[in-house]
Amino acid sequence: MRARSVRTGCACSRARHTSKRTASRARWPTWPNTRCLGFTQPESLNRWPLRGVHGDEWNIAPSLVASSGETLRQLALAGVGIACLSDFMTGTDRASGALVQVLTKETADVRQPVNAVYYRNTQLSARITSFLDFLSQRMGG
């Protein structure tokens, strides 16, 4: 199943360290003392969707890397630095004020495909079938 894409590319910072005013005035790449949190692999996840003279992507040199988006989210929540994560990962944190989006004016709207991979040649359990039906309905696939 290949579903509709999800929005990605939200650079987030811990709310306690970044006021909404500071976030709206932030300019890339001159934002002072910015520590970027990135992924170990694939390298494409370290190209943030930030518009500028370089185009619609900015290749970051992460100060700290992790293999998990959840780890990067927790590091951003702890105030270690900023991370570029999908909206579905940060939506609740941004709604509660725990994280704030920074560089909003520079952020390009990017959508990534969502894929569900499974064996078609075997009998699917009711749980997997139900989950795939849910994804298909919810994401328009």
Image (cartoon, rainbow, N blue to C red):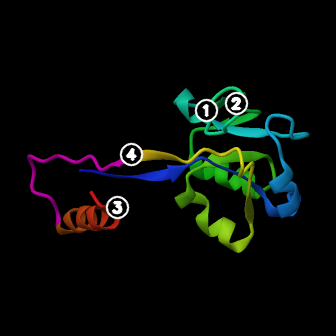
The residue depicted at 39 percent of the width and 45 percent of the height is: 113
Under tag 3, what secondary structure?
Answer: helix
Amino acid identity at mark 2: Ile
Q: Count neighbours of disc 3 (C-alpha within 10 A) and say few if under 14, some if 14 to 19, many if 20 or more.
A: some
Q: Which residue is mark 2?
A: 60
Magenta residues?
114-125
Under tag 1, what secondary structure?
Answer: strand
C-alpha span from label 1 to label 4? 16 Å
**Residue 52 in the image, given as x and y percentages of width and height:** 71, 33
Q: Which residue is mark 1?
A: 47
Under tag 2, what secondary structure?
Answer: loop
**Whether label 1 touches label 2, CB < 8 Å:** yes
Q: Tag 4 or tag 1, which sits nearer the N-term?
A: 1
Residue 43 horizontal side relative to residue 34, left or right: left
Residue 96 seen: yes
**Whether label 1 touches label 3, CB < 8 Å:** no
Query: With respect to residue 73, does 108 lie above or below?
Result: above
C-alpha span from label 1 to label 2? 6 Å
The residue depicted at 25 percent of the width and 61 percent of the height is: 132
Residue 38 is a magenta residue: no
C-alpha span from label 2 to label 4? 22 Å
In the image, 115 versus 57, the foreground residue is 57
Q: Quadrant of residue 74?
A: bottom right
Q: Tag 2 or tag 1, which sits nearer the N-term?
A: 1
C-alpha span from label 1 to label 3? 25 Å
**Whether label 4 touches label 3, CB < 8 Å:** no
Query: With respect to residue 59, does 25 lie above or below?
Result: below
Residue 135 horizontal side relative to residue 55, left or right: left
**Can you tell which mark lies on residue 139?**
3
Q: Which residue is mark 4?
A: 113
Amino acid identity at mark 3: Met
Q: Tag 3 or tag 2, which sits nearer the N-term?
A: 2
